[in-house]
Image (cartoon, rainbow, N blue to C red):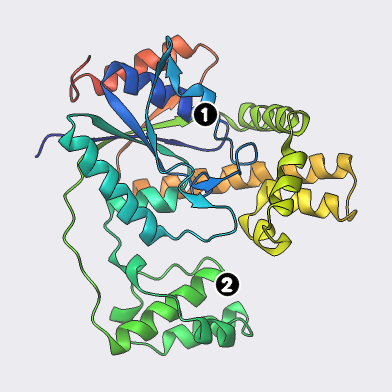
Amino acid sequence: MPDKNLLIVLGATAVGKTKLAVQLAHAFNGEIISADSRQVYKGMDIGTGKDLSEYEVNGLKIPHHLIDIKSAGQRYQVNAFKDDFYEAFEKLQTLGKLPILCGGTGMYIHSLLQNHELTAIPVNEQLRQQLLLLNKEELQRELNKYPLKLREQADLSSHKRLIRAIEIAEYLSHHNLPTEKKKELNPLVIGLYNEVDTRRNKILSRLDDRLSHGLIEEVQDLLKGGVSEEMLVFYGLEYKFVIAYLKNEINLDTLRERLGIAICQFAKRQMTFFRKMEKDGVQINWIEAVDDRTLVQKQAFDLATPYFKLN
């Protein structure tokens, strides 16, 4: 078994991943690589929870990567993330730094650990427009028309993912799978979790803090800067609901209530995805994110010390 060459800190939203990853980076001579699908965008700070002030320990700045690398209004896909990740990963290895991947976008993390080559298959907009007219059952029938070997890795859980599965099967019917040899990753994976009630309370508390510290104004600034309403709705959660508020479709109390529910549901889906990763063979070392941060850090350090050199 090769030596571990990557440390991963994952977990649902609001669990405290960044704080822990920064402490680990400080202790083990590391730098952070973000695994967050929305923190790549400039100007989307409050809604995505960048919390850039947290990237500092005892006055020392901890470098981070894959944050603020795209303009708001652009799209960013998993295959672009993989390319950007490996560029940062190899750079840090050359510098003798420990790469620490930190985030809650499970699909991004899993795509690296499972080396999902299917993410390189391009979008087929014409096919997608045709498939959007079909319901889930019809999409399932369309997918079943393809040979099993072209759909055996398909995710059938949603309308969107069924469309992607058909898109992949159609591509593979006429093309060879693009392959590129990447450096093997042998990570230590640390997962932070809270019990459901604690998670909900943290999410709602953080939402109140974001609303009182400029979330709505951030969305207004993005609109003024030329980002379309449609694109902000596409980015989801905070941006989607604030757009509804700005269009007078909901009031502030309804914004808080519905957004709070949506974020809690999102956190539940994140945890479900992480459990799926475990079923796929990814070993996640879970630590409960209790209020005693010193205890959380000690548990994480105890896990990391056998594999990584302390500063």
Q: Please tell me whether mark 2 or mark 1 is closer to you in this view.
A: 1
Residue named by callout 2 = 159
Quarter of the picture holding the N terminus: top left
Q: Residue 307 location, x and y as percent?
A: 18, 25
Helix, strand or loop status at disc 2: helix
Circle 2 crowding by C-alpha within 10 Å: few under 14, some 14–19, many from 20: some
Residue under the image location 22 percent in, 15 percent down = 310
Amino acid bearing label 2: His
Residue named by callout 1 = 52
Helix, strand or loop status at disc 1: helix
Distance from label 2 to label 1 (Cα)?
35 Å
Q: Furthest-front residue in view? A: 225
Residue under the image location 88 percent in, 39 percent down = 253
Q: Earlier in the sequence, mark 2 or mark 1?
A: 1
Quadrant of the rendered image containing residue 101: top left
Q: Residue 256 location, x and y as percent?
A: 80, 39
Q: Is residue 184 left or right of residue 71?
A: left
Q: Residue 60 location, x and y as percent?
A: 39, 15
Q: Furthest-left residue in view? A: 1
